[in-house]
Amino acid sequence: MAAGEQLRGFRVLVAYGGGVLHGRVEVVGGTLPENLRFDVSANRADMPRKPASASNVFVDAQGRFILRGLATGDHEITLTPFFPSPQGRIRSGRWSEIKQTISVKDGAESQITFVFNVNPPNPKERKQ
């Protein structure tokens, strides 16, 4: 784009966020495989195209995480299991992302818990 050109057909969304989300991951069904890690992301569930509403964070060794700077509204929180590698993150086909929607208020603290099953049922077995 050159100086003086006009740009049309886009919107800029800016929202101040003072909400804080404290979360934890509860592991059931066994022990986590060595090196399995979790990433947590937040997206606005109440807006078109679900824009990101906070920077991704990692779950610590005690299964806790904190998302800061969330604006008032509904947010889709996603827990993503992965294995770190020199080439980046490797997703395992064994586990799916887990998503929850939570309402956040500016200046307030909210809580969320994800239950992660180390041995999820086989999808083929569930259909029977």
Image: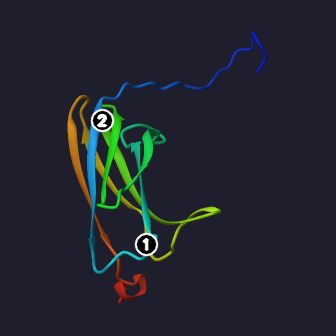
Amino acid type at mark 1: Trp
Number of residues whose C-alpha sits closer than 10 Å to that of mark 1, classed few (under 14), some (14–19) or many (20 or more): some
Relative horizontal placement of residue 115, taking residue 120 as reference (left or right): left
Q: Residue 36: which quarter of the image?
A: bottom left
Residue marked by disc 1: 95
Mark before the other along the chain sequence, 2 or 1? 2
- Residue 29: % across, % down: 28, 80
Q: Is residue 98 above or below residue 2?
A: below
- Image spot of residue 83 (x, y percent): 51, 68
Q: Nearer the viewer, residue 6 or 17?
A: 17
- From what the image shows, is residue 78 above or below residue 121? above
Residue at the right extreme, as displayed: 2
What amino acid type is highlighted by mark number 2? Answer: Gly
- Quadrant of the drawing holding the N terminus: top right
The residue drawn where x is 33% and y is 31% is: 71
How many angstroms separate mark 2 from mark 1 (CA)? Answer: 29 Å
Q: Secondary structure at mark 1?
A: loop
How crowded pointer 2 is (Cα within 10 Å; few <14, some 14-19, many 20+) is rated as some
Relative to 118, is 84 on the left or the right? right
Label 2's element? strand
Give me the residue at 28% from left, 34% from top. 19
Looking at the image, the residue that sits furthest to the top is 4
| Vertical relation: 74 (above or below) 88 | above
**Residue at the location (37% across, 85% down)?**
127
Q: Position of residue 96 (x, y in %)?
A: 43, 68
Q: Nearer the viewer, residue 27 or 93?
A: 27
Quarter of the picture containing the C terminus is: bottom left
Q: Nearer the viewer, residue 25 or 10?
A: 25
The residue under label 2 is 73
| Residue drawn at (43%, 64%) of the image | 37
